[in-house]
Amino acid sequence: MKKQNFLAFIALALPILFWGSAFPSIRYALSGYTPMEIATLRFIIASLLLVIYSKIKKFGLPEIRDLPMILFFSLTGVVLYHLPLNTGAKTVTAGTISLLNATAPVFTAILSFFIVREKMRGKGWVGISISFLGAGILAFNIGGGISFSFGALWILFAAFSESFYFIYQKKLLSKYGALPLTTYVIWFGALMMLPFSGNLFESVISASISSSCAVLYLGIFPTAIAYVLWAYDLCKFPVSRVASLLYLSPVIAISLGWFWLGENPSVLSLVGGALAIGGVACVQRAKYE
């Protein structure tokens, strides 16, 4: 394999690996931190690393007139995504979190249809229906029994919120570029998290080393490194090819949840997950045909 092709493979594979591992890491970190504390500390760590990154790349601050839109990105793509996601993780297994979270492109397609009038083919609407059917099965199958989980609703709300970030970020991507814009979003997202930090300082002192290492991992790898690499991928490769790799994230999350946390997926949850992912794939294919 040529060096250039190998580096491209690494740039594409690492974000998927890191994001797939984020869900079981969140579940593990909950033993020492609250959902709000995990999200806040995660983005504080990522922000500090990206300060170093911004100095290396030598890009300045955004223009004042663009701040309202960047703050909106931080609100929807960071605060209203990670806080509900972590809250839902208290009662939902890592694999199920990843499968429910994978419905974000479906919400993006629906919002694009109503907000920016993006056309949707019949195949796309079929895919949306299939994906929501799968999400419904997952929501009623938490823990292997037929009972409804409000934790699943939190995760679906997180995916819904993130969809606004996906839709509107295009307006500033061409102006700032993917890497600087992603950095700005994480910085302001970390600031917005601070009011929700609770007793973060006390938790850092009292939490076990292993749970603190899980949060440290979340801040460095699934956040700072993965977000930057993902922005790089979007600049270098076709969006459809990059987006299709997200389907591998639940496989990683389910595998790690199984071996690391002992979370055995039920047959019904796997069926629901297959429907959810299959519906997303159908929507993505309809968009790019």
Image: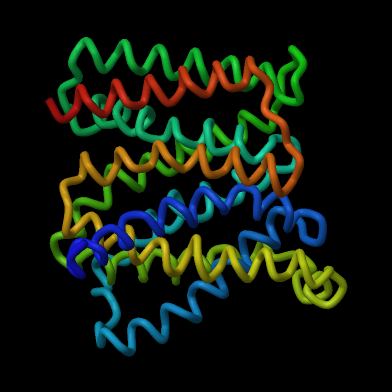
Residue 59 seen in the current view: yes
Residue drawn 46% across the image and 53% down it: 17
Q: Residue 220: x and y, percent?
A: 52, 71
Q: Residue at x 42, y 83 (%)?
A: 51
Quadrant for the N terminus, please: bottom left
Image point (63%, 46%), residue name: 256
Q: Nearer the viewer, residue 9 or 58?
A: 9
Q: Is residue 260 above or below residue 247?
A: below
Q: Nearer the viewer, residue 70 or 153?
A: 153
Res 107 → quadrant: top left
| Image height of 117 relative to 87, above or below | above
Left or right: 101 in relation to 7: right
Residue 60 is situated, as x and y percent measured from the top left of the image, at: 26, 83
Residue sitting farthest toward the right: 206
Give the number of marks. 0
Q: Residue at x 26, y 25 (%)?
A: 114
Question: Which x, y percent locates residue 226?
Answer: 41, 62
Q: In the depicted view, which residue is nearer to us: 71 or 88?
A: 88
Q: Is residue 115 above or below residue 15?
A: above
Q: Quadrant of the C terminus?
A: top left
When the figure is inspected, residue 131 is found, relative to residue 81, above or below; the finding is above
**Residue 194 coordinates in the image, percent (x, y):** 62, 68
In the figure, is residue 96 to the left or right of 1? right
